[in-house]
Image (tube, helix red, strand yellow):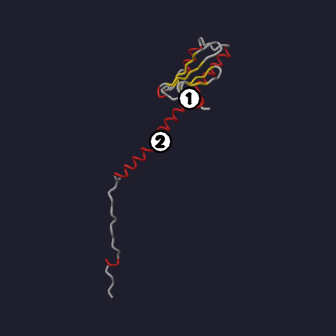
């Protein structure tokens, strides 16, 4: 018996079939579709989250301004500002105080015993569903929108 030849002893070597590297058009279309669906869901959700945060900042500024007005009343026994008007306007006009304003705070209907504070949306918040936020000297909260309720916008 003869010994097997070298080619008979080794299994036949096959080179792996190599596909060209990259993505097929179908894979690319499926990926783009998935990203599009995720973006269609995520972007509006994120936008509403940012708007809620901006509203919270405006509400906080109103409460802070009301606290300032109460301190002023405690010192002078009146809500009328006189010389303090400039201090109030400088401190509370823009929300946030630096950067692009999203709300303007104004003081109206000021008498010796009452006032109304209003946060008016501006810049990126223009056209917000809650509209203007109001807070008066009695602690009554309000909004100018008829599309939403005060509890929805003030977060109760």
Circle nearer the viewer, 1 or 2:
2
**53 horizontally vs 20: left or right:** right
Pick whichever, 3 or 115, lies toward us: 115
How far from the left and from the top, in percent, is residue 142?
Answer: 59, 24
Residue most extreme to the front:
146
- Can residue 4 be seen by looking at this rendering? yes
How far from the left and from the top, in percent, is residue 64?
Answer: 61, 24
**Which image quarter is the N terminus in?**
bottom left
How far from the left and from the top, in percent, is residue 27?
Answer: 37, 52
**41 horizontally vs 80: left or right:** left
Mark 2 or mark 1, which is nearer the start of the sequence? 2
Density class for disc 1 (Cα within 10 Å; few <14, some 14-19, many ≥20) is some
Residue 39, quarter of picture: top left
Give the alpha-carbon distance from disc 1 to disc 2, as whole Å: 25 Å
Residue at 55% from the left image edge and 30% from the top image edge: 148
Residue at 57% from the left image edge and 16% from the top image edge: 108
Considering the numbered disc 1 on the image, is that residue within a helix, a strand or a loop? helix
**43 horizontally vs 76: left or right:** left
Tell me the number on the disc at residue 21: none
Tell me the number on the disc at residue 57: 1
How far from the left and from the top, in percent, is residue 93?
Answer: 53, 20
**Which image quarter is the C terminus in?**
top right
Considering the numbered disc 2 on the image, is that residue within a helix, a strand or a loop? helix
**71 horizontally vs 54: left or right:** right
- Which residue does the numbered mark 2 point to in the structure image? 41
- Can residue 96 be seen by looking at this rendering? no
Pick whichever, 2 or 104, lies toward us: 104
């Amino acid at each position: 018996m003869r010994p097997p030849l070298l080619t008979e002893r080794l299994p036949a070597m096959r080179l792996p079939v190599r596909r060209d590297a990259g993505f097929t058009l179908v894979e690319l279309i499926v990926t783009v579709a998935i990203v599009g669906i995720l973006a269609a869901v995520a972007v509006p959700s994120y936008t509403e989250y940012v708007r809620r945060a901006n509203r919270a900042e405006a509400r906080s500024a109103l409460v802070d301004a009301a606290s300032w007005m109460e301190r002023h009343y405690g010192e002078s026994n009146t809500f009328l500002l006189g010389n303090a008007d400039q201090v109030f306007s400088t401190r509370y006009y823009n929300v946030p105080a630096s950067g692009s304003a999203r709300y303007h705070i104004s003081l109206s209907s000021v008498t010796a015993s009452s006032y109304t504070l209003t946060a008016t949306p501006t810049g990126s918040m223009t056209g917000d569903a809650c509209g203007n936020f109001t807070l008066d000297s009695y602690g009554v909260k309000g909004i100018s929108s008829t599309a939403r309720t005060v509890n929805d916008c003030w977060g109760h």
